[in-house]
Amino acid sequence: MKVLVTGADGQLGQALKSVFKLTDIETIFLTKSDLDIASEEAVLSKFKYICPDIAINAAAYTSVDLAEEFSDEAFRINELGAINLSKGCNIIHAPLIHFSTDYVFNGKKRMPYLLSDDPDPINIYGKSKLCGEQKIQKQCSKYLIIRSSWIYSEFGNNFLKTMMSLAKKNTKISVVNDQFGSPTYAVDLAESLVKILPIIKNNNFKSGLYHYAGEDTLSWKDFADQIFYHAFKIGLIDQIPEIKGVLSANYPMQANRPYYSSLDSSCFLKTFNVNPIQTSLSILRSLENL
């Protein structure tokens, strides 16, 4: 089996690399400098040359606030890139695995979002990712779109690493406590994906959209509480900072965030027979790998 992964320099791409290196699967990792997915010519040329059995798209424009200012770039990567990757996969008859986001929802719900819930993004990032989903669904012959939520890991820049940096310098920290999501360890996501690759390669699946995220719904403050608890327990910090919960309104940002974007992963778990992502255990795993 030959697998091509775009966005190899991103957080999810690095998590995939860490998991794939433990397997005997032939994998080609392409960074954004190796392949601009927004260039149709570059994508088609690369796909024809490599001719993978499966393509995994971990490339995305993920700067939620900057997307408000640079919307053209967000749509160039997240929508046009999805179109080009669909074309590339169709030419070589390979299925496309594509990652999307909980930010396609408006956050007005107070229960985990189901696949049947209508998307209604409230920021440019979410809109660009939704457009990417829709283009893949219309243009790609065989695909798997996986929405996830609040991804963190020992790689790249993310909430867990930010909290650890703050904890080493501060005894008191303010964290938003009125936004809720499903923190998802990128390595868990990567491991489950590798497990289902034989199913994807053999076309023993129906193209579609799925949710796969951490099993617990937490606020950012809840998430920070768990990070500090485990970090202190394994000796990464000398003391647990005092955390003050604050409202999002106290920290205005360029992009609106959904107040609730937890995802229901039951369909993915049942369809592909994978394990749920256990939030507390996954936070500990990520900290141990820092």
Image (cartoon, helix red, strand yellow):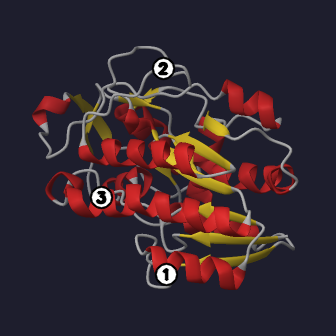
* Quadrant into which the N terminus falls: bottom right
Question: Mark 3 or mark 1: which is in front?
Answer: 1
Q: Quadrant of residue 6?
A: bottom right
The correct choice, above or below, for 115 with respect to 282 in the image is above
Report if residue 290 is visible in the image: no
What residue is pinned by disc 3? 74
Q: Which residue is mark 2?
A: 117
Query: Pointer 3 and pointer 1: residues touching (CB < 8 Å)?
Result: no
Instruction: Out of 276 and 59, give the one closest to the viewer.
Output: 59
Q: Residue at x 30, y 30 (%)?
A: 258
Q: Amino acid at mark 3?
A: Ala
Where 185 sits versus 44, above or below? Answer: above
Using the image, tell me which numbered label, if any, was put on residue 42.
1
- Residue 153 location, x and y as percent? 53, 57
Residue found 11% across the figure and 33% down from its top: 250
- Which of the marked residues, 2 or 3, is nearer the chain's N terminus? 3
Spot the residue most to the top.
Answer: 110
* Residue 243 visible from this viewpoint: yes
Q: CA distance from mark 1 to mark 2?
A: 36 Å
Comparing 172 with 103, the one in front is: 103
Please give the name of the residue rendered at 88% of the width and 53% of the height, measured from the top-left corner: 202
Among the 4 quarters of the image, the one containing residue 248: top left
Image quadrant in which you'd find residue 194:
bottom right
- Left or right: 213, with 217 as reference point: right
For disc 2, the neighbor class at 10 Å (few under 14, some 14 to 19, many from 20) is few
Circles 2 and 3 in contact, beta carbons < 8 Å: no
- Tell me where residue 172 appears, x and y as whole percent: 24, 43
